[in-house]
Amino acid sequence: MFRLDEKVAIVTGGARGIGRAICTELGAAGAYIVAADIEPSDETVKLVTEAGGKAESLKLNVTDQATVDETVRAVAKRLGRLDILINNAGIAIDRLLIRISEEDLQRTFAVNVNGAIFCAKAAIRFMMRADAGRVVNLASVVGEMGNPGQTAYSASKAAVIGLTKTLAREYASRNVTVNAVAPGFIDTEMTAGLPDEIKEMILQQTPLGRIGKPEEVAA
């Protein structure tokens, strides 16, 4: 297994689901984990510790740029470095186009797109100084292929893919890589609320014919 000893990683949305699995995986590889979430969880810290890693949990609202800047700055100053940012925080409001409200759009893009931009902007400042860094954005397969009933979510994840490609070009010369992982249908709290007909349609389009696991995305 690869090692990340001495590295510091911030994982947004680290309190549950894919984010929690990512925290555990990176922690087991030796990274010090900062699990940032709108609703922090001691369970994530517990799982990282049990996996042989070290972690802390803190509250972070990724839609507030000033708070993001302050939080990332404090983490980098206190720990002396910031090597990895995982932009995992996200929400899904599943509605057909004709039922989407302006508030639905604003909320979805505030978390999924603005949040990723705010966190990347804050973290890359420190990575540029170190001439090294890794940013991984969580997109989604629906951002590439679309999905009925997920207009706002699909559009936001397509935006994350565009953001990823642009930042990769902007900061490659500073040895800061930016990549996206685009999971399919994963068994999390977020997907649990999808209507059965949507779940069945997604499964029919999935070659393995089953729901993915958070640990598979983390790996």
Image (cartoon, rainbow, N blue to C red):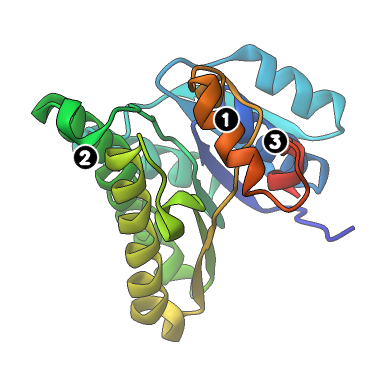
Relative height, residue 24 to residue 26 (above, below): above
Relative height, residue 66 to residue 132 (above, below): above
N-terminal of the pair, mark 2 or mark 1, is: 2
- Label annotation for residue 199: 1
Say whether residue 139 is visible: no
Dot in front, 2 or 1? 1
Q: Quadrant of residue 170?
A: bottom left
Residue that mark 2 sits on? 65
Q: Kindly indicate whether the residue at mark 3 contacts the one at mark 2 (C-beta within 8 angstroms).
A: no
Which residue is the extreme one toward the left? 102
Q: Nearer the viewer, residue 163 or 193?
A: 193
User: How far apart are the alpha carbons under marks 2 and 1?
Assistant: 34 Å
Left or right of 191? Residue 168 is left
Label 1 secondary element:
helix
Dot in front, 2 or 3? 3
N-terminal of the pair, mark 2 or mark 3, is: 2
Residue 49, how many percent across, how many down?
Answer: 80, 25
